[in-house]
Amino acid sequence: MVPLADDWQDALEDLSSAEDFLDFFGVPYEPSVVHVNRLHILQRFHDYLGRNPGPEESSAAFVHRQSLLNRAYQDFVESNALKEKVFAVFKKPENPGDGFVSLESLLGTSNLGKPAN
């Protein structure tokens, strides 16, 4: 359902939860799925918008965003947060040693512990 007013984008500022967004864009949802994945759904929606901002014309923009939000929600109906890896915490390397960063590489020097001239 497309809102009647062309200024629907102003109403986005009042949305604060995944349920608010899903209701606003008319995306049917199962509360149990949203309860467990609300932040993941919103982040995935944000990621999709970042990669594909879509049209600028108001009604087409609404439909585009509705489609992306539905896609983000469906990602978590068909999968789960661990498999989807939306947040960095889920993207840790398989081998914990792969994430090691030496102090020397951060400072760009191997002269640690040597007095400055």
Image (cartoon, helix red, strand yellow):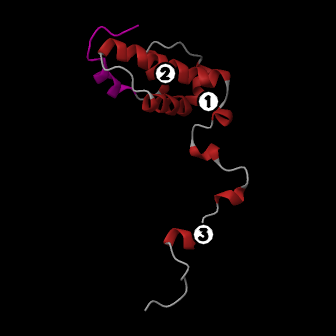
- Dividing the picture into quadrants, the one containing residue 99 is bottom right
Label 2 element class: helix
SS at badge 3: loop
Q: Determine whether, in the image, residue 110 is placed left or right of residue 92.
A: left
Q: Distance between the Cα atoms at labels 1 and 2?
A: 16 Å
Q: In which quadrant will I find the C terminus?
A: bottom left
Between residue 4 and residue 58, name the one nearer to us.
58
Give residue 102's mark. Answer: 3
Disc 2 marks a residue whose amino acid type is: Leu
Q: Position of residue 31 (x, y in %)?
A: 58, 19
Q: Return the x and y of residue 37 as percentages of the image width and height.
A: 59, 30
Which circle marks residue 36 in the picture?
1
Dot 3 amino acid type:
Ser
In the image, the segment drawn in magenta is 1-15
* Mark with earlier residue (1, 2): 1
- For label 2, the residue is 69
The residue drawn where x is 42% and y is 20% is: 65
Element type at marker 1? helix
Q: Nearer the viewer, residue 28 or 88?
A: 88
